[in-house]
Amino acid sequence: DEEVSERMLSAILKIEGYEIISASNGKKAIELFKSKIPDLILLDVDMPEMTGLELISIIKAKQELKDIPVIFISAHVDLSTKIEGLDLGGIDFISKPFQNGEVISRVKVHLENSLLHKQLKELNNKKNKFLSIIAKDMKTNLDENFAKIQLFEDYLKANDTKSLKESLSNLVKHNQQTSNYLRNLIYWSRLETNQLQISPTPISLAR
């Protein structure tokens, strides 16, 4: 809510290459969030109309905003205010008067951590989707294999060697598919854990 502090913070972070949007109170910030979702929020505690603690409660209650890291910057240095801010979802607390280097360092660290968190979340979603596809395909093949094995006894009793051979051939085929799924799963796991050395080489597409 202090124009001088807002201008100083904006100038400091713009020099570092960050894109800055600002609001002089909590209500204006909420309006800004409707058109622009920030990567990180710097938030004062004492503000007109709505305190920073009230604003962070609103931010953390919104699905599209709840994962954004929030750093408090305030003249409040008492422990109870810090604890309340952190309990409400803040990740850091910078005391005023702030030091330029401290602000830059903490913003950089928390932005990098946030990016890593997003990447891990995306990778985990891809992993779960991949495993779901593999598990479904393997279950289908195993179910079909069990059904064919149960038919073998009937074919043997009926001395139907032709149907028995066909079922055995399909069983081998499905077992090979299941084996391929497992090999792909192991290969993917080795890729994810950087156990494979990738050596790209040029090839002739025409050939």
Image (cartoon, rainbow, N blue to C red):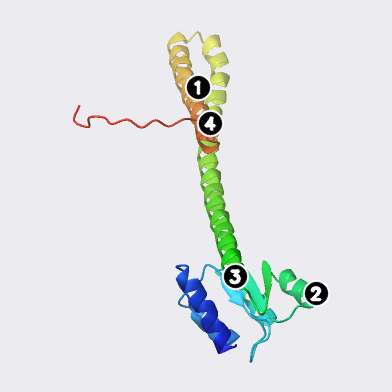
**Where does label 3 land, which residue?**
103
Kind of residue at badge 2: Leu
Q: Quadrant of residue 63?
A: bottom right
**Where does label 1 land, which residue?**
175
Tag of residue 195: 4
Please tell me how crowded label 3 is: few (under 14), some (14-19), or many (20+) other residues with Cα within 10 Å. Answer: some
Please tell me how crowded label 1 is: few (under 14), some (14-19), or many (20+) other residues with Cα within 10 Å. Answer: some
Kind of residue at badge 3: Val
Q: Which is closer to the viewer, label 1 or label 3? A: 3
| Residue 22 in picture, x, y percent from top left | 51, 81
Residue 115 visible? The answer is yes
Q: Which is closer to the viewer, label 3 or label 4? A: 3
Sequence-first tag of 2 and 3: 2
Sequence-first tag of 3 and 4: 3
Query: Is the Cβ of the residue at disc 3 closer than 8 Å to that at disc 4?
Result: no
* Distance of label 3 from label 4 (alpha carbons): 38 Å
| Quarter in which the C terminus is drawn | top left
